[in-house]
Image: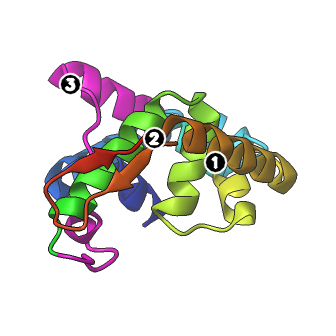
Amino acid sequence: MVFLRYVRSRGITRDEAEDVVSRTFLQLYRARQLFLSADNRPAFGFKVLRDVLADHFRAADRRPRALPLAAMGERPATDGGISELICRLDIEKALELLPPQQADCLRLHLFLDLSHTQIGFYLGITRSTVSSHIFAGRQRLAEHLENYRPSRSGRGKEQHA
């Protein structure tokens, strides 16, 4: 279920996400000897998932897009959805500026509500490394979004000096 939720958090429709996850499990089946001998099977599987997802975006010749959280079926929309979608798109743009592991730690923590221990389990890193990535990532996000303030009316974002 985490695999599907992670792929959905990257802006993939449910059908596309199911396809990506299916292809991931097919890859894992084909590489079953490597998978079974891996020290951390969930991290190995998550790495394969990210590779299959990257292949999906390359084949579709597009970048990840953000979906409103409510569209992911995970959390309810807060104020009609438009301002939430704009905020989510801006956060996704800022996440793309971070190192990949920081961005993945933040996505898993912020969008999927995984604990630091769970994130470490899936990424094959220690809990303290996850904490460091989340701390550093939040600081960098704060720098990138320093003047960001979503509008209350849902018409976009406003900047203040």
Question: Where is mark 3, residue-wise?
Answer: 62
Residue 60 covered by magenta stretch:
yes
On the image, the x and y values in percent for residue 81 come to 17, 68
Image: magenta residue range: 51-79
Q: Say which residue label 2 marks.
A: 49
- Of residue 33 and residue 127, the one placed in the foreground of this image is 127
* Amino acid on which the number 1 mark rests in the picture: Arg
Measure how far apart labels 1 and 3 are at the Cα level.
26 Å
Callout 2 amino acid = Leu
Q: CA distance from mark 3 to mark 2?
A: 17 Å
Report the residue marked by disc 1.
138
In front: label 1 or label 3: 1
Q: Looking at the image, do the residues carrying marks 1 and 3 touch, with CB atoms under 8 Å apart?
A: no
The residue that appears at 15% across and 61% down in the rendered structure is 82
Does label 1 or label 2 sit earlier along the sequence? 2
Q: Which numbered disc covers residue 39?
A: none
Task: Specify which label sits upstream in the sequence, 1 or 3.
Answer: 3
Sequence-wise, the earlier of marks 3 and 2 is 2
Helix, strand or loop for disc 3? loop
* Snapshot quadrant of residue 109: bottom right
Vertical comparison of 159 with 13: above or below? above
- Residue 42 or 157: which is nearer the viewer? 157
Q: Position of residue 87 (x, y in %)?
A: 31, 54
**Quadrant including the C terminus:** top left
